[in-house]
Image (cartoon, coloured by chain):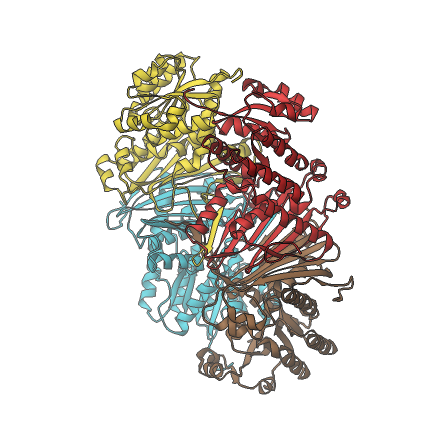
Chain colours: A brown, B red, C yellow, D cyan
Amino acid sequence: MGELHRVKIAVIGLGRMGKRHVHTLLNRVPRAEVVAVCSTEPHEVAWAEENGEYKEFGIAVYNSYDQTIAHPGLQAVWISTSTDVHASQTLAAVEKGLHVLCEKPLSTDLEEAQSVVDAANKRKNLKVMAGFSRRFDASYRDASMKIAKDNAIGKPFLVRSNTCDLLDHTGFFVRYARRNGGIFVDCAIHDIDLALWFLENPVPKACWACGTLQHHPELKELSDVDNAVGTVEFWGGKIAYFYCSRTQAHGHDVCTEITGQHGKIMVNVIPRSNNVVVADYQGLRHEVQPEYWERFEDAFATEAREFIDSIVNNTPVPLPLEGGLKVMQIGRALQDALLSSEVIKFSQDGVRL
Amino acid sequence: MGELHRVKIAVIGLGRMGKRHVHTLLNRVPRAEVVAVCSTEPHEVAWAEENGEYKEFGIAVYNSYDQTIAHPGLQAVWISTSTDVHASQTLAAVEKGLHVLCEKPLSTDLEEAQSVVDAANKRKNLKVMAGFSRRFDASYRDASMKIAKDNAIGKPFLVRSNTCDLLDHTGFFVRYARRNGGIFVDCAIHDIDLALWFLENPVPKACWACGTLQHHPELKELSDVDNAVGTVEFWGGKIAYFYCSRTQAHGHDVCTEITGQHGKIMVNVIPRSNNVVVADYQGLRHEVQPEYWERFEDAFATEAREFIDSIVNNTPVPLPLEGGLKVMQIGRALQDALLSSEVIKFSQDGVRL
Amino acid sequence: MGELHRVKIAVIGLGRMGKRHVHTLLNRVPRAEVVAVCSTEPHEVAWAEENGEYKEFGIAVYNSYDQTIAHPGLQAVWISTSTDVHASQTLAAVEKGLHVLCEKPLSTDLEEAQSVVDAANKRKNLKVMAGFSRRFDASYRDASMKIAKDNAIGKPFLVRSNTCDLLDHTGFFVRYARRNGGIFVDCAIHDIDLALWFLENPVPKACWACGTLQHHPELKELSDVDNAVGTVEFWGGKIAYFYCSRTQAHGHDVCTEITGQHGKIMVNVIPRSNNVVVADYQGLRHEVQPEYWERFEDAFATEAREFIDSIVNNTPVPLPLEGGLKVMQIGRALQDALLSSEVIKFSQDGVRL
Amino acid sequence: MGELHRVKIAVIGLGRMGKRHVHTLLNRVPRAEVVAVCSTEPHEVAWAEENGEYKEFGIAVYNSYDQTIAHPGLQAVWISTSTDVHASQTLAAVEKGLHVLCEKPLSTDLEEAQSVVDAANKRKNLKVMAGFSRRFDASYRDASMKIAKDNAIGKPFLVRSNTCDLLDHTGFFVRYARRNGGIFVDCAIHDIDLALWFLENPVPKACWACGTLQHHPELKELSDVDNAVGTVEFWGGKIAYFYCSRTQAHGHDVCTEITGQHGKIMVNVIPRSNNVVVADYQGLRHEVQPEYWERFEDAFATEAREFIDSIVNNTPVPLPLEGGLKVMQIGRALQDALLSSEVIKFSQDGVRL
């Protein structure tokens, strides 16, 4: 196939998202070649070994991370495992000289996350990136262009952002929640990242949060809630506020509003599955995406493509790895505010007081 | 005109809203007869004395409140003056045996407001009501019916509500702000009232707020802001959060979302002036109401009609006067949280700690 | 009541719309005084005689049109009877020296309609108007202003307009259809009027139509259909096309799009009952007005007010009576095209060939 | 790369769409391998020869169709040339034993189109398909599922469908129009196809059309217009009507409404570029896709994928080739009606009278 050199990559983790990442790489990233997948779950390994498409594309299936990263010729990994092993797996891959795209967050432990950033910074030739997928979404990018290039709304000072998941009746979510760090760390992390993006990296001053349990009483023992509202005040008169929910009836509803001095940009305030509206005895209605996958499938493809391109072209990764640390610091502060009912404050340098 | 007996009413205050209330009564409340108007502003008095329509309808013009409430045969007053005289004027009218529709709030001072409620309670034959106009809006009423009667969303536990005014370039707002009690007392009061309505009168547990000054630096000396976000946690796992703004570019934007266990009701999340959309080189666009008047004109007419009907039929006023006290208590707490940056807490009986 | 002189008016016909017109005049037109109503239907007369509000407002109830127009002091009539007596009743009222607001159309017979126009033209002191209520709707007026004053879309050359009624399960519609002149005369007449308005009174060149029977087979013997599409080509490169339906599932759906050389104005393309959206397991939905009353209630009030004002101020009626003739000519041509399956053509003078 | 066998395909024509088809195949169809491209335009050939991506992927560049289809190992062609050579190129490829995906329409000449169908039918082992891309759009497919599987609207009887292009200021369109067969053949062809799909292959009974020239007077000598409305009545009480425009100000606006006895499905009635809304002094607005590419990019990828899959799996092509003939017959009849101002009629067998 001509002069084409494709980046040999392995996908780590074959849960819902891991499978989707394989799908994205196979179908939408022609400069990537998926050479291996890895899971420690026997049923996932078995599923992958029987998968006709994986065979067709010649993908090796591993049940050991160490063996995977030793796959001959491997150049990169896409880590899509549970949060608690993100940091160690990233470190091991960096150690091996592999490029890494790691699902957010690097770690719910700030020190551990910092250690990953430090390790990556020592290997400047490696591309190491945390997957804040919304940064690659066409609508958010359009919003950013309108604000930064077109000055469409003047100086932004306020962000409202929601991440609201469809209520899960399968028990999957509650199991998953055990290792995710809490609603503000797991669910609001993208919203916090968007707020930092659109407010131009402001420094937090104070935050407060409260929550409620409406559908998943099992979360109580995890010191977590299934619906929460949090507000962050930044130094310099900027504000961001968030609503996260695990219990929406109508679908996956993610919206963001950025208010500036001369206008406001609304992203996905009315969520829609597609272009179809049904008119019947109930009036007019449309469906909503059930999951973030349907909302952000294109963004994941763009993310994967830009990550692979940064390897092929040896250019900086599209998102600096450090960004995730600040997001996590704010997420943790909101989670602590939620649990303590107290205001969490920060110095003008962003040091938590 | 047959057996028709019309309620003789005076409108007190001829600012923007006072004039509109006269208009509403003349044009949309056939069982009311506007016999007098009153203003202490000489230019408003002069304007009213020259007003052809007022002459046509035989409306007397006063520059003294005491003279107005002594107008022969007068039965009721609609008080539309500045907040600082609401309580004293209401008390004087009640003293005179007049029915009173008083613009919200009765007072920014909770004790004074309580004294008005007490006075009204002693005169059960009088109809005394505070004007929470959104309670009369067709969309909010439809939302309430859907929730309470149709069980459309299950048990409500979360309210998001905004009151965002168009930026005022005339200086009117800043002058007006001197006597309004602050952004959460003046601007969020309707949102707090809606939250109490839709969450079925929950008891506040804690609240926090923060704000920013974007366009009106003059507010700083009033200890006020022009944009603010506030959150109220209620006992029993309910939450309300609010955004108030004085500086919107696109119009008067008032929206409310009520989330329940099985769904959400959205009121006016996409504000529209009318049914017109323009498609041109910029895409598709529609205008937004410039002021709450355009959004709530029908609600004011319903409010006036139902108040007058309660007099004609000697039935209870559509809204109990006491409701306003609880709203004000929360508004004041949010304003204090805004100024102190501290969480304000309440006991399970709703007593501020 | 001061110097106020109110126009004494009678409402003729107490069907659905007649009752609503009384309601409008009582509640929203303070310069009108309803002194009488008239119906030839015994059950409507009985209903009116028992009506408490009619008694309260001192409204006389007649079962004879002749007696009604002889009511002492009567100045005007609002004719809301079936189309077949519009012309004769208007002529009789004009003969008596009464102002007339007559529901559209004056007649389904063009000659008869012309005779009414001729009679009115001889009595220039009388205000005689046909009720094309959409001309008084705020959104259509805003569209007109945007086009004519703001030049928002350049020169208009195309109109699409729909009138789609909610399916009637009561049998009312089929009974009513016996005397209404057919779907293009009864249902499309407002759309044709809008097309003439927005296209600046173009001259028809050719038209064609087709239809179908989906729910009301009884219409077959009336040579009518319950869904129809018609297109009118005008001299000068302008086009209007219409869809009329009697069988919508979702509500009364009336929309109009006006396309010009530089843009398009859309009026009510997404119909909405109010500002409420429900989010639940089905997605997002809103209701649609069930009837034209809910859509055009304000327009009827404006129409009544402007008609009464033209009497009080002795100014021209807001709509020239002649306009209805041209509308009817086109409606008849479309109905004939529907029945014949042939193109109906017109000369450059608008004479049907 | 494992057992993967990829279909070797050439893209014929390197105009706007040809380039996009190469892009789609390279990026979104992993089972296809683009081995060659072909253009007879020297500047396109030169552009392709310099194209870094084409080199990277090892794509041969030809300036002769005959040489292209003789490319060693070639299995399929995607014909994206001007309509006048579609038929001859398809025939030549079929002759060579190649699979063919040909842009619609096969020919503006019905007999020629029939000859292609006949030739393809003789080579059952070959996959020959005309590219009606909207059949692969997720929203249209969802509409189809809702109608056929969910019975969401009862039996469909009416289709309204528009294809409205953004006004072209570059002169490209007018040049392109010389060979496209007229507005109903070129622009409405997708709408006609959708009508046949959603109305379940009805037989035409009569049609009429009219048009106007608003921006492109050059079309007059081509006997064409730049805006047109056409209506098709089908035997059995079904109707479709179309609006086509070359002169929209706001973007590429393609919408379809399907009305059934119990409801209506609306596809893209409010076109949107993405999820972004801007609120500023003008109100609320969003952008619209400039071209059908932005609206249908995903549909083209699905089309390509399903075509390639039908080759790989040796299954029937997703769309029968014959469908295009009926669409073309109706498009031609509408175009003739437009030119003659007369109704075109068909027998109950669909034979034009």
Does C245 sit left or right of B25 as displayed?
Answer: left
| Image position, residue A156 (x, y; %) | 69, 52
Quarter of the image for residue D135 reads bottom left
As drawn, the residue found furthest toward the front would be B122
Q: Is residue B239 above or below residue C234?
A: below
Query: How many labels were placed on the picture?
Result: 0
Quarter of the figure that contains the C terminus of chain A: bottom right
Q: Is residue D170 visible?
A: no
Q: Is residue C145 visible?
A: yes
Observer-nearest residue: D53 or A136?
Answer: A136
| Image position, residue C115 (x, y; %) | 33, 17
Quarter of the figure that contains the N terminus of chain A: bottom right
Observer-nearest residue: D189 or D296?
Answer: D296
Q: Residue at x 56, y 49 (%)?
A: D286
| Image position, residue C210 (x, y; %) | 31, 40
Q: Is residue A41 above or below residue A148?
A: below
| Image position, residue D5 (x, y; %) | 46, 78
Q: Residue at x 49, y 29 (%)?
A: B29
Observer-nearest residue: A249 or D161?
Answer: A249
Does B343 sit left or right of D178 as displayed?
Answer: right
